Image (cartoon, rainbow, N blue to C red):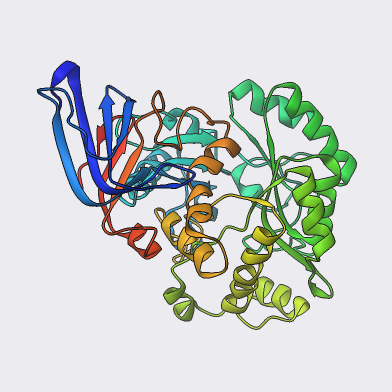
Amino acid sequence: MGGSAGMYAVRAEHAFDGTRFLSGGVTVLVAGDRIVGVETGPFDPPDGVEVIAFEGTVLPGLFDCHTHLVADGTFGGLERAGTMIDDALDAVIVQSLRKHAAAGVTTVRDLGDRHYRTLAFRSRVGLPRVVAAGPPITTPNGHCHFLGGQVDGDVARAVDERAENGTDVVKVMASGGFATPGTDQLGAQFSADQLRTMVDRAHSFGLPVIAHAHSLIGIQNALAAGVDGIEHFSGLSAQGFQIDDALLDEVARRGVVVDLTMGDDRELHALMPPPPPHVAEAMKRIGIKSFKDFYDQGLGLLGRLHQHGVRVVCGVDSGMLPPKQHGNAWRGVVEMVEFGFPAADALATATSAAAAACGLDGVTGQLAQGHTADLLVVDGNLSADITDLGRPRLVVIRGEPIPG
């Protein structure tokens, strides 16, 4: 593919540029790994430039801001990663990235691997870009301890280790999690002071801190510590789900980025087996009967986040379970529209807003001259039917079209 000076063009009848819909059709000019022009309306490229034309919508490639590339989307996949040799982990990572690419995801933020294996895949040809956290910081026998990120005492040193290994972000488990028996999903794994020590240390290296927090106390501690983002944001307590308006206003005021980790294939919820005893006990404590009930609470929170002006990004927790497959980011965007987001705002959570949250603002996430040529073309007009996002026609990663 190519022509004049190695340039080619992608033309579509509709476009979303990362922040807004563009009318009148768009032609995106690509040379090497860069966008060198974005032309609206009728436009004739230079002689010799191949034009790939579509009737659908062109937009920036999608982000999944919460993935676990070492997990294969089966039950227990993440736990198995804790026992696998490096070559086996790498094979799973490659397969996970290929699934993302096939669905139009051109950048992922990996928030929990083992042995820092994802760092080697940050810019592999033909695979999505990876923003990598390495093993998440957790307490002894804490949530996801099997990934190797346990720390007992010197939390600053745990941050130093990630900086020395070259991670792009620091992930810390502020609460327990459902995937790890024996952890407290309603409590806190680290105090606000411990989290603040980690945040201050990470920020001294220029690294953002993302906190896993299912519990209300975990969210409160994370906010007090000055974290940059909160994942899950369930608000669990002994009294059930507790996310009040004052909390949402405080999150918005601080500019903390929230990722509810939605985007499930909801048809698969009915096929989920009964939860293991430790999960069933946790669900009983908060008064919910099924995984679907828990998930529906998050769906109900989506519109409130938007109404309160909270910064939201699209992440799936992909790889964790069969409903959370790699490549499901488009489903998360569709859910946002279904539950209260305007289509342009929902798409931004997986493009420009996601790029800003991942430290890639000005690099990718927009159809703009000088940005990396990470592109997605889908059938249909997304401004009229957001579900067309799940019908990719062309995926371009750093200027290279990906075979369908």
- Residue drawn at 18 percent across, 16 percent down: 5
Whole-percent x and y of residue 219? 79, 54
> Foreground: 158 or 361?
361
- Report how many numbered discs are placed on residues in the image: 0
Tell me: residue 48, above or below residue 144.
above
Left of 67 or right of it: where is 94?
left
Q: Looking at the image, which residue sits at the far left?
A: 48
Tell me: residue 353, above or below residue 234.
above
> Foreground: 17 or 167?
17
Picture quarter containing residue 188? bottom right
Tell me: residue 165, above or below residue 179.
above
Left of 404 or right of it: where is 232?
right
Picture quarter containing residue 159? top right
> Foreground: 239 or 117?
239
Q: Looking at the image, which residue sits at the far right?
A: 193
- Residue drawn at 73 percent across, 80 percent down: 284
> Foreground: 322 or 278?
322
Whole-percent x and y of residue 180? 65, 60
| Quadrant of the snapshot with the N terminus | top left
User: Quick check: can you spot residue 168?
Assistant: yes
Whole-percent x and y of residue 319? 47, 55
- Residue drawn at 49 percent across, 62 percent down: 263
- Residue drawn at 36 percent across, 29 percent down: 124
User: Quick check: can you spot residue 154?
Assistant: no
Whole-percent x and y of residue 128? 38, 38
